[in-house]
Image: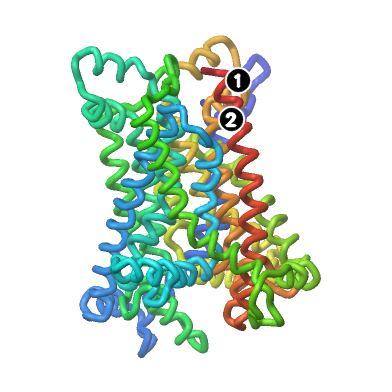
Amino acid sequence: MTDMAATATTGGFRLRLPGFWTSVTVFAVILLAIFLILPIFSVFFISFFDAKTGAFGFSNYAEVFTRRFYTVALWNTLVIGVLGMLGACLLGIPLAFCTSRYRIKGRTFIATFAVLVLCAPPFIGAYAWIMLFGANGAVTNLLSFAGISLPTIYGIPGIVMVFSLKFFPYIYLMTENALNTINKSYEDAAENLGCTAFQRFRKITLPLVFPAVSTGAIICFVLSIADFGTPAILGKGIRTLSTIAYAQYTSEMAGTPTMAVTISMVMIAISMAALLLQRHILAKRRYASSLTNRPVKQSMRPLKSFIVHGFCYLVVFIAMLPSLTVIYTSFLATSGPVFTGGFGLDSYSRILRDSPQAIANSFMFALAAVVLIAIVSGLLSFIVVRRDNAVSGSLDLLLMVPYLIPGVVMAIGYVTTFRYPPFDITGTALIIVLLVFIRRLPYGVRSTTSILRQIKPSIEEAAVNLGASPAKTFLSVTVPLMLPGLIIGSLMSFITAINELSSTLILYTARTITMPVLIYIQVIDGEFGTAAALSTLLLVSTGVCVFVVFRLSEDKEASFV
């Protein structure tokens, strides 16, 4: 690529325009500067003002790292984040290996339900676990009759279990994609040398898909330490940085939320450290393959088939239990907020009558954000992976920030930044779409980069050598190769975007209210029937979209094998 320069010609000097990827890089920097860096910096400096005196300094950070109230929460956050990540890996990696290597009956349904786990309705999901495994939960009471006592769902073990079951789809989706694209000849060579199946997986397969596994693991880690709802409901006195940040924000709403912002900055620093560790490990070796000799799914002997199918079905069934509980609740007969016994469609009739605006807004905002994410993530992924310079490295680090910024704090930044003419978009649908776009952009970029790292640059270089322009090479060669990553990234972005609550709760108006906000309001008001009906509508409609995408991607994949 060439930069802007003066080029001598017979007629004098001609100004050479910047190269395609130079222009894209400049565009990416400007985009992130306006919609990510600027809102963050609008609240970042708040963390340096003392919460009590207003003096400028590091007193807030000193308090976070020295006062036992905060240090215990910091330790709890790290423990929950690491254990939640490991639990998600223990579920997601085996599931991905089974569905990518063996002929699994109902594989599309398994993949669809695994993704739907990510759609656990806000606030209701945690309550559903209590309804099932709490002190008086349905499963707890059922097993107690058989003399079986379950460990309590409250505290760190319960939080870790919920996070493991909720976040393993990130590991599963990214790892399965990578497993389907590696060169199987490496595994065949190891088998010919006498390696056992486990040795082949540990020494050959897992290292080859490590970029995808580590990417999913980082997502699980940062989401585990940033999640507020689950620790708040299941913690029973267990403090984490996220719960303290929320408490600090609500207590400081009349003033400046200094400590809430300070804690948020600490959480960002933790996520940056995790990303730097991943980059350090990835930099030590190459992971690209030639995309030839892709794995072919194998048939299994009856006993092995029974075990593998049983494992796959059991994982997704247990993970889906909260959602199934919500669906069951939505069909209970109600009279206003009161369940009257028996079954009925009262809750659905109420939401179709009273909530069409919220339903329409949720889908329109999510789809608009995902279109932007698909376009921008493809371009950004190429810059991060192929443009080995300081700018690309900085962009990679910067794109981790939206994971960890609490939605409330990000929303405050947007309100602070975009409330003045000519950029006054506060109270509009645009501010919600832009915020959702920025917060969910990392899903698209992470998924796409994990695939792109496994594609040899020589394929693109060959197209350039044949005379194709950088733009045409990207559209004709790179995009089709990394399409699985784009599809999965867009899918995860859509699932999480349509369930966005924390930031939307600050930004919405009567005209821009969404289903998650309405569900939250109904839960607070005790309207569990209509909240469950809205959540079920969210699950079913999203499930249909996910199923269609998986079927299309499965058919496309089959044509290349």
- Left or right of 446 on screen, residue 492: right
- Left or right of 517 on screen, residue 305: left
Horizontal and vertical percent position of residue 67: 23, 80
Q: Earlier in the sequence, mark 2 or mark 1?
A: 2
Q: Amino acid at mark 2?
A: Phe
Is the Cβ of the residue at disc 2 closer than 8 Å to that at disc 1? yes
Task: Identify the residue position indicated by label 1 in the image.
Answer: 469
Closest to the observer, 313 or 180: 313
Q: Residues within 10 Å of mark 1 (few under 14, many from 20)?
A: few
Q: How many marks?
A: 2
Closest to the observer, 546 or 333: 333
Closest to the observer, 536 or 355: 536
Which disc, if any, is residue 243? Answer: none
Residue pictured at 55% horizontal, 56% vertical = 119
Q: Amino acid at mark 1?
A: Ser
486 versus 50 height, above or below: above
Q: Quadrant of residue 84?
A: bottom left
Rendering colour mode: rainbow
Kindly state the secondary structure of the residue where label 1 is placed. loop
Residue pictured at 40% horizontal, 41% vertical = 310
Horizontal and vertical percent position of residue 557: 55, 25
Q: Quadrant of residue 80?
A: bottom left
Task: Identify the residue position indicated by label 2 in the image.
Answer: 20
Closest to the observer, 393 or 206: 206
Q: Is residue 148 visible?
A: yes
Q: Which residue, as the protein is rendered here, is positioned at the far top?
A: 466
Horizontal and vertical percent position of residue 240: 33, 72
